[in-house]
């Protein structure tokens, strides 16, 4: 049960572990959209995060550490069964999904939620081109 994901039960998240303060949480809901739609969404979000990071005159975003450390992007899936296989391949390409990691039960108990954390610097454009960071590149 998601309510059991607590420090008391041994669960922790990186923002707390690294003493980071989340200023912006971007939640992206997903059901069974195709890879182009999800890629378009993720790439747009990554471009906006890049723009926030590049705000040199912002005292808000430049105070207390790098801006990207204050932004959390959360993908919320309504189960993995209905997910488009090609979409899962895109998520694997950027490093946020691994086939076979999600389990239906653990120690005989049905799994009702999964939480994964990953920091990615890769993006896939709507035309399925892989974008890697290259200094101050506008991409």
Image (tube, rainbow, N blue to C red):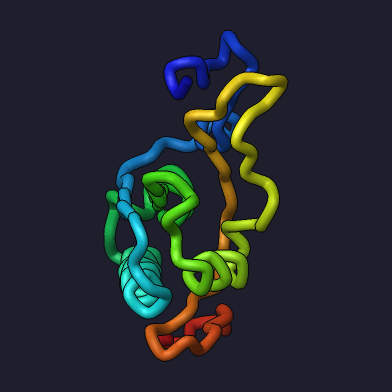
Is residue 101 left or right of 3 when viewed as pictured? Answer: right
Find residue 110 and report its image quarter.
Answer: top right
Instruction: Return the residue nearer the eye: 16 or 29.
Output: 29
Instruction: Return the residue nearer the eye: 39 or 60.
Output: 39
Name the residue: 50% across, 89% down. Answer: 129
Name the residue: 55% across, 32% down. Answer: 13
Q: Is residue 10 visible?
A: yes
Instruction: Return the residue nearer the eye: 102 or 68.
Output: 102
State the quadrant of the C terminus. bottom left
Residue 61, x across and y down, in percent = 33, 53
Residue 97, x across and y down, in percent = 60, 57
Name the residue: 48% across, 50% down. Answer: 80
Instruction: Return the residue nearer the eye: 135 or 79.
Output: 79
Is residue 9 depicted above or below 85 in this figure? Answer: above
Residue 7, x across and y down, in percent = 56, 15
Is residue 91 depicted above or below 112 in this figure? Answer: below
Residue 17, x across and y down, in percent = 59, 30
Q: Is residue 54 visible?
A: no
Name the residue: 41% across, 51% down. Answer: 75
Is residue 42 left or right of 103 when viewed as pictured? Answer: left
Question: How many numbered tags mark residues here?
Answer: 0
Is residue 9 left or right of 71 when viewed as pictured? Answer: right
Farthest top residue? 8
Is residue 43 depicted above or below 63 in this figure? Answer: below
């Amino acid at each position: 049960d998601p309510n059991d994901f607590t420090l008391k039960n041994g669960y922790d998240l990186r923002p707390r572990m690294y003493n980071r303060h989340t200023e912006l949480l971007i939640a992206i809901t997903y059901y069974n959209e195709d890879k182009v739609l999800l890629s378009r969404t993720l790439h747009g979000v990554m471009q906006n995060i890049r723009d926030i990071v590049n705000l040199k005159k912002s005292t808000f975003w430049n105070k207390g550490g790098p801006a990207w450390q204050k932004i959390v992007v959360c993908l919320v899936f309504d189960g993995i069964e209905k997910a488009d296989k090609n979409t899962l391949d895109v998520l694997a390409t950027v490093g946020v999904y691994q086939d076979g990691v999600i389990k239906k039960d653990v120690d005989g108990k049905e799994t009702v939620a999964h939480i994964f954390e990953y920091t990615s610097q890769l993006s896939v454009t709507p035309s399925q081109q892989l974008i890697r960071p290259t200094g101050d590149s506008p991409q």
